[in-house]
């Protein structure tokens, strides 16, 4: 896969954690459409069925997250790491949610840094705070701190509000919230929600543009603005 000329990422490699999720799929489409990296590796617990053309353009590394230290090779030789990994309390239970959203992410980040990764781009959540009384926001705040402490040359943390998407997995309550917020977004487009495609474009734009310090935290409004800085494909 040829890298785009003038993109600033020629000859570089990246990996994506969480490519099976809504944001991860949007991010993968964005990366492949823009040809920003010569090598794109998807790191996950199983191989994804992506279609012949997409599968030919990426590498897939299957890992056991419970024994992640045994898979250090999957994280070797990447300049940039994108992390969209996450689950829900309803799906995985409290312990499972903490393990995936905090422990797996932090362990993967450590292996990535040891493997030469310079820039780690983490999808977190609006309201993330290690002192929050809400489990979800507390865990997101904790993982932000853990990733920052690893010492990447550059760390970008995105804190999107409610994600707007056509989720493949059935979540009725979330679907109803999205319908409501989709209407609200017409009046307050950057306040309470953000399309996953915008988050994906912002993640890509964060790599293309110079950073503001070693750690940069992008709140929902900044995600909207940065997502617009990278034109949509076909426009």
Image (cartoon, rainbow, N blue to C red):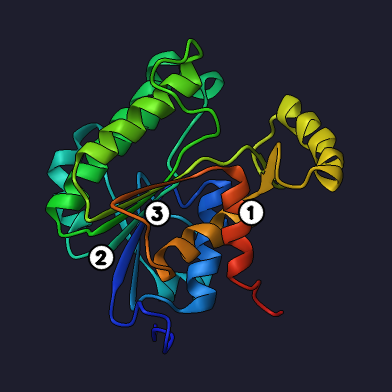
Against 50, residue 187 (above or below) is above
User: Mark 2 or mark 3, which is nearer to you?
Assistant: 2
Q: Residue at x 69, y 30 (%)?
A: 171
Q: Position of residue 235 (x, y in %)?
A: 71, 79
SS category of the residue bearing label 3: loop
In-image side of 194 versus 126 (left or right): right
In-image side of 23 versus 170 (left or right): left
Q: Position of residue 15 (x, y in %)?
A: 33, 59
Against 122, residue 53 (above or below) is below
Q: Residue at x 35, y 44 (%)?
A: 45
Residue furthest top as drawn: 133
Give the residue pinned by disc 1.
224
In-image side of 52 versus 15 (left or right): right
Q: Which of the two discs, 2 and 1, labels the residue nearer the N terminus?
A: 2
Closer to us: 149 or 89: 149
**Residue 64, disc:** none
Q: Residue at x 48, y 31 (%)?
A: 87
Q: Which of the two discs, 1 and 3, labels the residue nearer the N terminus?
A: 3
SS category of the residue bearing label 1: helix
Give the residue pinned by disc 2.
79
Q: Which of the two discs, 2 and 3, labels the residue nearer the N terminus?
A: 3
Q: Position of residue 201 (x, y in %)?
A: 56, 62
In-image side of 208 versus 38 (left or right): right
């Amino acid at each position: 896969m040829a890298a785009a000329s003038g993109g600033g990422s020629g000859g570089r490699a990246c990996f994506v954690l969480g490519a099976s999720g809504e944001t991860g799929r949007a991010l993968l489409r964005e990366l492949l459409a823009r040809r920003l990296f010569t090598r794109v590796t998807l790191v996950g617990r199983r191989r994804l069925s992506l279609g012949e053309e997409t599968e030919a353009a990426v590498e897939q590394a299957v890992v056991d997250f419970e024994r992640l230290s045994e898979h250090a090779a999957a994280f070797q030789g990447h300049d940039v790491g994108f992390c969209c990994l996450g689950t829900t309390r309803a799906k995985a239970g409290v312990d499972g949610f903490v393990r995936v959203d905090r422990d797996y992410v932090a362990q993967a980040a450590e292996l990535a840094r040891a493997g030469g990764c310079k820039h780690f781009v983490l999808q977190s959540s609006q309201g993330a705070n290690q002192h929050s009384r809400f489990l979800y926001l507390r865990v997101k705040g904790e993982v932000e701190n853990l990733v920052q402490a690893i010492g990447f040359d550059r760390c970008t943390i995105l804190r999107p509000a409610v994600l707007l998407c056509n989720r493949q997995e059935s979540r009725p309550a979330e679907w109803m919230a999205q319908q409501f917020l989709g209407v609200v977004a017409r009046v307050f487009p950057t306040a309470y929600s953000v399309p996953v495609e915008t988050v994906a474009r912002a993640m890509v734009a964060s790599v293309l543009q110079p950073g503001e310090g070693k750690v940069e935290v992008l709140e929902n409004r900044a995600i909207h603005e940065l997502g617009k800085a990278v034109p949509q494909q076909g426009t």
